[in-house]
Amino acid sequence: MKKLVQSVILLLALNVNGFASAEEHIATGHSFEQLQKQAEAGDASAQARLGWMYANGIDVSIDPDRSYYWYQKAANQGFAKAQYELGTMYNSGEIVTSVAKDPVKAAEWFQKSADQGHAKAQFELGMMYLTGEGVSKDISKAVEWYQKAAAQGLAQAQTNLGWMYQNGKGVEKDSVLAYAWQDLAAAQGDENAKKLRDIIPINFSQRTEAKKLSTNWKPGQVLSRQ
């Protein structure tokens, strides 16, 4: 997974559709031994949390293979977070694990997770449809999955969707919607979105409309112009 060696220093980091932080884990009061017992008894949530702990070195030494083992257990039970993590493993190919890069398997796991509403999986699936890696290239489907993730507030998806509108990729070119999506992502601290937003050729009236759209946006909403 992309942040396999992430340090405990990220205690307060938020993770859409995942375990919010190491701090949240500590707050649950579940010891490693308790989680281990629950996971061995077939609790998918405990299995996924163990996978996360082994991936990030929380209460245990980092062990990518054990992480994969527990994520797979949970994923096979339909746990969306674990399905997403398996997708990232197959998408990147972890050098220190037995997981070889396999875009087709990555897409399959992302699809399972995305179908359950996991925003990051939806974003990754959108990326795969955009590039044609692991699936047949389909720009319209890329837009569809970006929209689902963006509606959940995922900045990466909002940025990419803004770029699609800015360049007319899979959608009709629309500077107002491009600006509005980039503005939403920029408000979350996405510097790339801010740069892309600020180079969009847009007049005062259009910018005012775009700002109104982004200001009035609510989670679950896909921006559109009346």
Image (cartoon, rainbow, N blue to C red):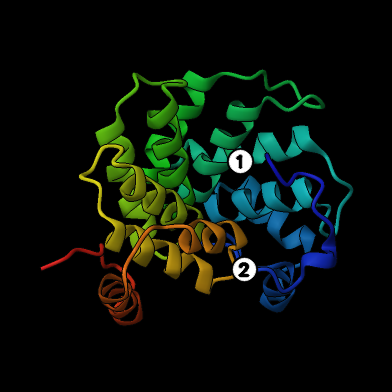
Q: Position of residue 61 (x, y in %)?
A: 89, 48
Q: Residue at x 67, y 18 (%)?
A: 100
**Label 1 neighbourhood size at 10 Å, few (<14), some (14-19), many (20+)?**
many
In this image, 123 relative to 195: left or right? left
Q: Residue at x 27, y 70 (%)?
A: 206
Q: Position of residue 164 (x, y in %)?
A: 35, 45
The quadrant in which residue 78 appears is top left
User: In the rendering, which numbered label is found on residue 71?
Assistant: 1
Measure the alpha-carbon separation of dots 2 and 1.
Answer: 20 Å
Farthest-out residue, left: 226
Q: Residue at x 19, y 63 (%)?
A: 224
In this image, 185 relative to 115: left or right? right
Looking at the rendering, in which quadrant would you find the N terminus?
Answer: top right
The quadrant in which residue 208 appears is bottom left
User: In the rendering, which numbered label is found on residue 195?
Assistant: none
Q: Position of residue 77 (x, y in %)?
A: 45, 41
Which amino acid lies under the numbered mark 1 shown in the image of this protein?
Tyr
Give the labeled residue for mark 2. 14
**Label 2 neighbourhood size at 10 Å, few (<14), some (14-19), many (20+)?**
few
In this image, 214 relative to 182: left or right? left
Q: Nearer the viewer, mark 2 or mark 1?
A: 2
SS under mark 1: helix
Which amino acid lies under the numbered mark 2 shown in the image of this protein?
Leu
Are circles 2 and 1 on residues that touch, CB within 8 Å?
A: no
Q: Earlier in the sequence, mark 2 or mark 1?
A: 2
SS under mark 2: loop
| 202 shown above or below 24 | above
Q: Residue at x 23, y 43 (%)?
A: 171
Q: Is residue 44 visible?
A: yes
| 110 shown above or below 184 | above
Return the residue nearer the eye: 72 or 14: 14
Looking at the rendering, in which quadrant would you find the C terminus?
Answer: bottom left
